Structure formats: structure tokens, C-alpha cells
Image: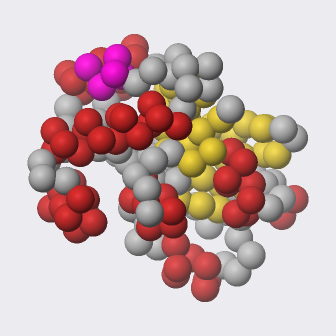
Amino acid sequence: MNWFCSDTHFGHTGILKHQPSRAEAFANVSDMDDYLIDQINKYVYPEDELYHLGDFCWSASKAGHYRQRLKVRKLHIIRGNHDSSSLKQHCSTFQDMLCKKFDGQKIHMLHYPMVSWDALHYGGIHLYGHCHGTYETQLDVLFPGRKSMDVGIDNIYRLTGEWRPISLNEVMERLV
């Protein structure tokens, strides 16, 4: 199965200040890291693939530590604004953006939201992070019928009540 997430910000103490829902949910960054890793491991099995759309962790020197704790074997990272190129050694693929077909559905993945993307007018989907769910309502108003989604864990929490990745099936149910 294919899974998507973004903006875990492992080890980033500042995220607790910038994201009030995280500050309410977690006493400190260590509790946040442990919980998010447990949630990813709960949903994403070793034989699955996880597409992480940026801002994996705050400190490049700790990337291996966090990666080692994830049970999934295939971790694909789309570079976020907080990701160092040294993260490359800890994942299956490391790219600035990725356009890939899943079961015949073209999905364009980037850390940032875009107004237009490949195959937009032919049913193509755009998945992104970076915004922590803050633009979803405005984008729905500006671009009704758009097939794009913030897969950052803060937005998935807003949508589902759980801090976790989202499956390809769930993305398709919401967007197609």
C-alpha cells in the first residue's frame, strides 16, 4: 500500500510554538516524535511505501535516528524547506518533486502547493505539505473542484482527528 504524509518536523521544538494543536497534544518534542513515529508504524507496514512530502526532521544529524525508528522499508522523500540533502542517504529516493502514476492515476508531489500541475485538466492530482492545513479552505473557495490536498500531518489531524499518514485509497476517496 502507498501512504503519504508531510511536515513531521521530528526534533523541532519550535513546531510546538507554531502549531497550537501540537502544543495542546504534546508535552514536549520528544513526546511528539515518539507518538508520530508510533502512528506511522501503526498504519504503514514494512512492505508498504511511504511518500514523505518534506520537512522530515529539524536536525540533519538526527535524520538517521528517526529513519531507523520507522519500520517501512521504502521511504521516498520529497525535499522540504527544512530538509538537508544529507537526508538522501537515509531514504529510498530523495527528490525536489515527483510525478508518478498510482493505479493509472497521475499524482504530482511537491512540498509546496501549486496553482497548476501536470495533467491538472485531465484528472491529475497534486499532493503537498508545507502549509500545515492553513490554506485548505481558502484553496477550496478559490479553486472549486481542485484535485489537490495538503497531506501534512497537521491537516490530516484536522480532517481525521488523528496524527497519521494518509493512504492512497483515502486520497482517492477524497479527491476523485
State which region is magenta.
Answer: 65-69
> Closest to the observer: 34 or 102?
34
Which residue lies at the image location 21% right of the left edge and 24% below the top edge?
Answer: 62
> Closest to the observer: 140 or 43?
43
Q: Image height check: is 39 above or below 76?
A: below
Q: Residue furthest front?
A: 42
Q: Position of residue 119 (x, y in %)?
A: 81, 54
Residue 66 within the magenta-colored segment of the rendering: yes
Q: How many marks?
A: 0
Q: Image height check: is 38 above or below 165?
A: above
Q: In the rendered image, is residue 13 in sight?
A: yes
Residue 123 within the magenta-colored segment of the rendering: no
> Closest to the observer: 5 or 116?
5
Magenta stretch, overall SS: helix
Quarter of the picture containing the N terminus is: top right
Q: Image height check: is 33 above or below 94?
A: below
Which residue lies at the image location 65% right of the left edge and 35% below the top edge?
Answer: 2
Q: Residue furthest top?
A: 89
Q: Position of residue 41 (x, y in %)?
A: 45, 31
Q: Position of residue 174 (x, y in %)?
A: 70, 63
> Closest to the observer: 15 or 114?
15
Q: Position of residue 107 (x, y in %)?
A: 72, 46
Quarter of the picture containing the C terminus is: bottom right
